[in-house]
Amino acid sequence: MANKKTILVTGSKGQLGNELRELAGSVKDADFHFVDIEELDITNGQQIRKFFDEIKPTHCINCAAYTAVDKAESDRELCDLINVTGVENLAVACKVHDAVLYHISTDFVFNGNASQPLTEDQDTDPVCYYGESKLKGEKQVAETTEKHYIIRTSWLYSSFGNNFVKTMIRLGETKPELGVIFDQVGTPTYAKDLAASILEMIDAPEDHFGIYHYSNEGVASWYDFTKAIFEYKAITIPVKPIPTTAYPTPAKRPHFSVMDKNKIKTNFDLAIPYWRDSLKECLEKL
Ligand SMILES: NC(=O)c1ccc[n+]([C@@H]2O[C@H](COP(=O)([O-])OP(=O)(O)OC[C@H]3O[C@@H](n4cnc5c(N)ncnc54)[C@H](OP(=O)(O)O)[C@@H]3O)[C@@H](O)[C@H]2O)c1
């Protein structure tokens, strides 16, 4: 078939990669290649060139990343190697093969001082090394290949992999009470919703390359998020709101990272679910 798509998904054993794998069957006229570090290490430029020459992707969804936010502070070299050099390798290969690159980035590129939902053109200013490395990765993409989508998302969770939702359930089932941060505000994102939206973007009749913000709808603090998880899981231990200062971590986090999603909703006619509805759906699957 002349316009059959060949879609490469890197980092496919992570949260987003697994969600894409589950939804891939619903995409018509597309061959998917799901790879993770064992098959395709994005830091290995030579391996990437060979892989691209063999499968000739028309689209690449990069879910591979160094995502250990706190560890990144003391592990900068590896963090950069994956989030910057690895991303550059993929961008170069996409450019050579005229493939469209879907690269996932983060709300952590912002400093969190805003009080209105963040738009794509707002100034970036990461407050931790992970955010800095992701911002450098974004710049590599934008400077290397025109045919790109940089999708910034936030507070990602899924029934796959490790994440805040699973950690809270574990703690809720083993601790007598819990203190959770209430002064960091953002929006949780079910990786399945993001995966579905990326596949819709691939299927869209027109290209609108550039940077996009994507999370679920609504706003929450980590405290609100935890209360909702416990409500749906019928976990009854007391949960106390605590300030960030009471829970010091190696990496600083933005206090406010609610993103404005108008651009992605308008350009791709997307309907984005409310975070509580998506959380419920994910918990029912768990
Ligand atoms: N998780 C969040 O809360 C969050 C929030 C905002 C944005 N994001 C962004 O969203 C994207 C997807 O996140 P996620 O939560 O799905 O990540 P994830 O679950 O950590 O998955 C990342 C995958 O990439 C793999 N990987 C690491 N180094 C690699 C390499 N050199 N070559 C190929 N694969 C490699 C990882 O393997 P190993 O597990 O073996 O390292 C893992 O399977 C990332 O770009 C992340 O920065 C995430």
Image (cartoon, rainbow, N blue to C red):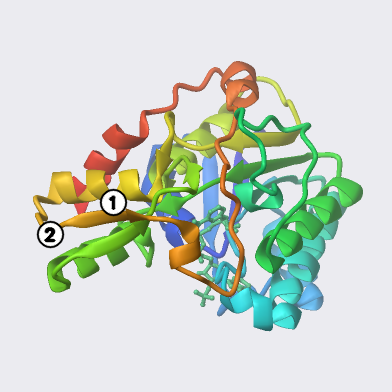
Q: Amino acid at mark 2?
A: Ile
Q: Alpha carbon of mark 1 to alpha carbon of mark 2: how far? A: 11 Å
The answer to whether 269 is drawn above or below residue 197 in the figure is: above
Vertical side of 132 occupied by 32: above or below = above
Count of labels in the image = 2
Q: Is residue 164 above or below residue 191?
A: below
Front residue (pair 175, 201): 175
**Quadrant assignment, res 113:** top right
Q: Quadrant of residue 50?
A: bottom right
The residue labelled by disc 1 is 226
Q: Where is mark 2, residue-wise?
A: 237
Place of residue 132 in the rendered image (x, y in percent of width and height, measured from the top left): 75, 61
Q: Farthest residue in the right direction?
A: 143
Identified by mark 1, the residue type is Thr
Determine whether, in the image, residue 124 is placed left or right of residue 174: right
Q: Which residue is at 61% across, 32% downward?
A: 115
SS at circle 2:
loop
Mark 1 burial class by Cα count in 10 Å: few <14, some 14-19, many 20+: many
The image shows residue 63 at horizontal and vertical percentages of 58, 58
Can residue 197 be seen at all in this image of the molecule?
Answer: yes
Vertical placement of residue 54 versus 174, above or below: above
Among numbered discs 1 and 2, the one appearing first in the sequence? 1
